[in-house]
Amino acid sequence: MAKKTYFITGTDTDAGKTLIACALLAKAQQEGLITAAMKPISAGCELTDDGLRNDDALQLQSAMSLDLPYEVVNPVAFAPPVAPHIAAMQAGKSLSVHRLSGFCRGFNMQRFDFGVIEGAGGWRVPLNPRETMADLAKELQLPAILVVGMKLGCINHALLTAEAIERDGVKLAGWVANRIDPDMSAFDENLMTLKKLIRAPLLGEVPFLKEVSYGAASEYLTLDALMT
């Protein structure tokens, strides 16, 4: 099969991008595919003996089957848990789509069948005064997968993000409904509305998981629409 790589974005920071990215990797592995993942930039890292390490990036590294060094999985890491451009500014460094896309292209040259590149925050998170995370996705020309954090207000967030992705000329390959609020009112009605209005395949509906694991989440996902 031809290599498949997807850019993972979300309706906001807590939509569950990493959980769904890892669950997609697990699902692909169950189907016998070699998997790989990266998070080009992270903010919110702990200083370890090996350097700065981000929990999301470590989860991606553990979920994929290809053995890649951490520096390939997460080439740009900042300690403060703030927006990437602010973390970079505080560290006296600059971010650019050109630099990040170089890391991503290097990653995409690795030998795997199914890969994911996880963005930071949502679609329009700034990288610098002129560029956003969306510009990185556009530069890479990869199809996007949207993780919708199912909670009050998610319809507006989801539709605005899907519209922005489409307007930016990026293909929305699919979306995932990830229930992050177990007490969300009118969940079924919200889901039905999103099914009608988002012009992309629903890859799965992940319920609220009391014990969160990407293995459990993978049971609710399908890759059928991504493999065609």
Image (tube, rainbow, N blue to C red):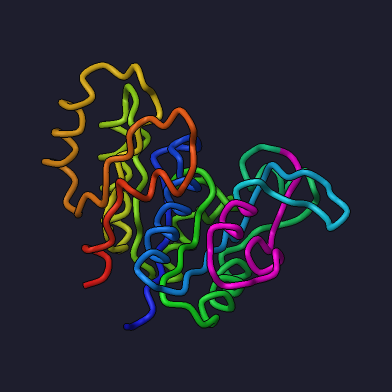
Q: Looking at the figure, which quarter contains the C terminus?
A: bottom left
Q: Does the magenta stretch include residue 73?
A: yes
Tell me which segment is drawn in magenta: 57-80
Residue under the point 64% across and 71% down: 68
| Residue furthest left in the image | 196
Residue under the point 73% across and 47% down: 89
Residue under the point 67% across and 45% down: 43
Q: Is residue 29 above or below residue 179?
A: below
Q: Please state the horizontal and vertical placement of residue 120, each as a whole percent of the image.
A: 54, 49
Q: In this view, does 190 lie to the left or right of 207?
A: left
On the question of residue 123 being in view, the answer is no
Q: Looking at the figure, which quarter contains the N terminus?
A: bottom left
Total residue callouts = 0
Q: Nearer the viewer, residue 99 or 118?
A: 118
Residue under the point 19% across and 54% down: 201
Q: In this view, does 115 lie above or below 166?
A: below
Q: Please state the horizontal and vertical placement of residue 112, each as a whole percent of the image.
A: 48, 78
Q: Is residue 213 above or below residue 187?
A: below
For residue 26, which quarter of the picture?
bottom left
Q: Please state the horizontal and vertical placement of residue 215, each as a whole percent of the image.
A: 44, 49
For residue 113, which quarter of the picture?
bottom left
Q: Does the magenta stretch include residue 175?
A: no
On the question of residue 30 being in view, the answer is yes
